[in-house]
Image (cartoon, rainbow, N blue to C red):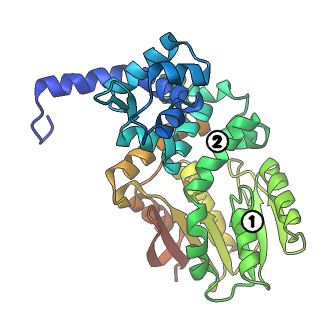
Amino acid sequence: MTKTAVKALDALNEAHKIALAPFLFQSVVCLRNLGVFDEIFKHRKKGGAKMAEIAETLSLSEYGLGVLLEMAESSDIVEKNELGHFELTKTGYFLAYHPTVNVNVNFTQDVCYKGLFHLEDAIKNGQPEGLKELGSWPTIYEGLSKLPSDVQKSWFEFDHHYSDDIFRLALQQVLKNKPRKIFDIGANTGKFSIACCEEDEQVEVTMIDLPGQLEMALKNAQEKGFEERITGYEIDWLKDNPKIPTGADTIWLCQFLDCFSKEEILKILSTCVASMDDHTQLVIVETYTDRQRFDSSKYVLEATSLYFTVMANGNSKMYKSTDILELAEQAGLEIYKDLPLGEYHTMYICKKSS
């Protein structure tokens, strides 16, 4: 039993909401995509929006609009005022216009929704059984460059939304000691590598990633004029005995380790240690479930773990900080800086254990 007393009727109501949650989610997607939220918001200073006027403006039947609005009203997303006109509640406003909420909605709808039907099989088999809804790859990472454009857009927006804002903060630490060579492991679209070169005219970056990802990232680097300072190194971390070059002053891993199981993380960190000398620093940036200020942030991370389970690879998750600390120590790393970074992230700066 929970420590907080909950009335049986309230608990039953909550259970009903969970049982029918997909109906509400799809209603929200429809209300947003069809322009209903926008139309209601547009009338916020005009006494609210009338059902008939919304339907006429958006070329919708009153029946179709009505069933959506009834669901939204019962879920405190819209409300009727004293004139019987519709207005957005605060929840409705956030669903319509909050950037983070919209990134999460798009990611859920475009990337994960169909695949989540296969979650039970993914749990049983330890494989991303929902990935078949997007393509026939062993993990989603092999398929990122081949995803349909709308799915790819939602995936990258989700990934970038939780990392882009901390790049400039991170660079203050990464570039503090004037590294000449940086390895960007899991370079994605190359945004961090490009940011390094924009910030420091002398630094050179090697992006280390899968071939498909590197192709996109190197193209982006070339478009920014950094083809001579940003190079690529192909790797598949799931193969036996992966190796990376030596000679880096800094090795950068941002939102990368959560894409792997604990055993794979240990292999990655051990491979990095083998390429380091006593002066190399290894930087790990992650969003840890036990270091979130708000419950909603922890909730988002734990939902993201299920994405890894059913869509990405079947065996990774959003970890606690203590998990990565233990794995870093096992790999032969010593963490000498433990820094909060922005609203969600933590930065570990590591060196080889002496």
Q: Vertically, is 348 above or below 45?
A: below
Q: Secondary structure at mark 1?
A: loop
Label 2 sits on residue: 154
Q: Amino acid at mark 1?
A: Ile
Q: Position of residue 3 (x, y in %)?
A: 12, 42
Query: Which label number is shown at residue 300?
Result: none
Is 323 positioned to the left or the right of 166 in the image? Answer: left
Where is residue 207 drawn, in percent x and y? 76, 64
Q: Crowding at label 1, few (<14), some or many (≥20) Cα neighbours within 10 Å?
A: some
Q: Is residue 91 above or below residue 113?
A: below
Dot in front, 2 or 1: 2
The answer to whether one can see residue 96 in this image is yes
Out of 171 and 129, give the one closest to the viewer.
Answer: 171
Residue at (88, 64) in percent of width and height: 222
The N terminus: image quadrant: top left
- Name the residue rendered at 40%, 52% in the picture: 297
**Image-based side of 9 in relation to 16, left or right:** left
Using the image, determine if residue 282 lies above or below residue 320: below
Question: Is residue 127 among what the camera can see?
Answer: no
Residue type pointed to by label 2: Ser
Between 276 and 217, the one nearer to me in the picture: 217
Residue on which disc 1 sits: 244
Residue found at x 53% / y 76%: 350
